Image: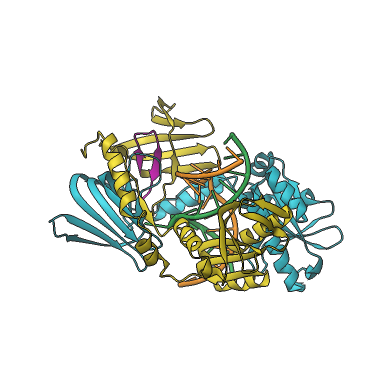
Chain colours: A yellow, B cyan, C orange, D green
DNA sequence: TATTAAGTGGGGTTG
DNA sequence: CAACCCCGCTTAATA
């Protein structure tokens, strides 16, 4: 990884178009060709590009220009004055971050306890294809009628939007020949299962006949207690995989 | 800005929970207290936190531990071995990035040419509050009926969701006493104005009575040609504002 | 402070 | 490759 401090300006064209006025910033170039320009505020870079093709040229004013190009975008950085440049090797094949308590975990956990959603509810499928995107959970209520469940940690208005879209999509399917038996989607209902449902979202969901279900925030501790394949094994796996490949300074 | 290269590990708790296994990475600490941990791939940090309260302690193994705390979250970094540490001042009051061709620009441009949306259409308001979020454009059609317009550069399914939510929200308002006259929202319609509408989105929009309108991709050149208050003035304003406040090394 | 939405969103997954 | 969705999204604007 290279770190450069420089009085620089930049122009990006690609998915958008941006220009960065002249100023002293840090430029970080990674081993894979990724580059980012940082000011001294916040975590996001001002400009950036990943896995780019690098080339150095000189402009009409005799200044160094770094070009980073990929198929669809390009970033051009003018180094008006370079104040510092250092380079240090980092770990290769970084195992990366272990996330816990993600929506995916929550979804998996709820699928094991469908009774949380309603008495007599039965789990059918996760990530069920509706035709307008996969819905988190497909379950059957006590009467055997399908319920389409959008799982969220925090539910906002867009969760209601999503859920309605799925309900309407499955209704278009009519009767579905599922491996677990025929499912008649013509009377499908929508449901939002979330640890936190915002007041406005709650109101809107009820108005649109999407049933809100609150999941107790204690689910996480129960999850890590019951589900042994989550914490340490995943970590150990990642670490050992990384170590076996790693040839970096950390070895 | 400080840049540290260290063999480190980290634990974050806050909006989620993550753990970062031990490895050599770069740690960047900015002037405002923001911190981020980078590996040698991509532009995104592994762990990060903004505007945090810093404290340094020592753990049971005699290693240095950096804690970054804010009201709702905390990041703890164990420095097993520090390999490098440098510090350099950057520009203060960075003018930041100038974006061009944003959705906001597109929205403003369309509002000047409401005829694009339909013959005899009149512009009423941008960012009109619907009660379920602000809609990009509120216009009146040739008959004087309100049309709620969602503007997008690229329209996906969520654009249809949004637009429908706005239409349904304004319909709840009934007759609205707008400064430009009474508007009867009971017959409000929805519209998506976008440079690119994806096939599936187009299909879904039609199905849900949201009228799709394609904006020619040439809008950008027309915009920068006709709208003089966009490019150079904004840049100059930002730069001069920054310079007047700036006390950094770039001055 | 909370809500809402855009972003060069990033990144992973699935068809 | 496109479509779709989660993310500790981040950041900005607005009420």
**Over which residues does the magenta segment extend?**
A26-41
Q: Nearer the viewer, residue A84 or A153?
A: A153
A160 sits to left or right of B205: left
Q: Which of B203 and B233 is in front in this view?
A: B203
Q: Which of B247 and B115 is in front in this view?
A: B115
Residue A200 position (above or below residue A7): below
The picture places residue B76, in percent across and down from the top left corner, at 27, 58
The picture places residue A177, in percent across and down from the top left corner, at 68, 51
The picture places residue A132, in percent across and down from the top left corner, at 65, 51
Q: Nearer the viewer, residue A232 or A24?
A: A232
Residue A165 position (above or below residue A222): above
The picture places residue A235, in percent across and down from the top left corner, at 31, 49
A250 sits to left or right of B28: left
Q: Tell me which residue sits at (41%, 62%) in the image.
A: B15
Most extreme residue toward the left is: B62
Q: Classify the position of the N terminus of chain A by image quarter.
A: top left
B47 sits to left or right of C3: left
Q: Tell me which residue sits at (67%, 70%) in the image.
A: A209
Q: Classify the position of the C terminus of chain A by image quarter.
A: top left
B241 sits to left or right of B187: left
């Amino acid at each position: 990884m290279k770190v450069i401090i420089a009085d620089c300006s930049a122009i990006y064209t690609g998915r958008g178009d941006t220009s960065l006025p002249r100023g002293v910033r840090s430029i970080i170039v990674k081993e894979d060709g990724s580059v980012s320009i940082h000011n001294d505020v916040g975590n996001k870079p001002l400009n950036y590009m990943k896995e780019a093709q690098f080339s150095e040229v000189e402009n009409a004013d005799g200044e160094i220009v770094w070009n980073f190009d990929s198929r669809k975008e390009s970033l051009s950085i003018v180094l008006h004055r370079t104040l510092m440049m250092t380079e240090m090797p980092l770990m290769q094949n970084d195992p990366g971050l272990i996330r816990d308590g993600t929506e995916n975990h929550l979804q998996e956990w709820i699928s094991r306890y469908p009774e949380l959603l309603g008495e007599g509810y039965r789990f059918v499928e996760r990530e069920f294809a509706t035709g307008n995107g996969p819905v988190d959970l497909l379950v059957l209520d006590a009467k055997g009628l399908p319920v389409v469940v959008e799982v969220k940690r925090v539910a906002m208005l867009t969760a209601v939007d999503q859920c309605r879209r799925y309900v309407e999509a499955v209704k278009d399917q009519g009767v579905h020949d599922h491996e677990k038996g025929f499912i008649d989607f013509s009377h499908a209902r929508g449901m939002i299962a979330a640890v936190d449902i915002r007041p406005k979202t709650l109101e809107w969901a009820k108005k649109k006949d999407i049933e809100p279900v609150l999941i107790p925030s204690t689910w996480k501790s129960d999850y890590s207690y019951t589900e042994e394949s989550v914490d340490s094994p995943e970590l150990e796996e990642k670490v050992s995989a990384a170590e076996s490949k790693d040839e970096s300074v950390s070895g």
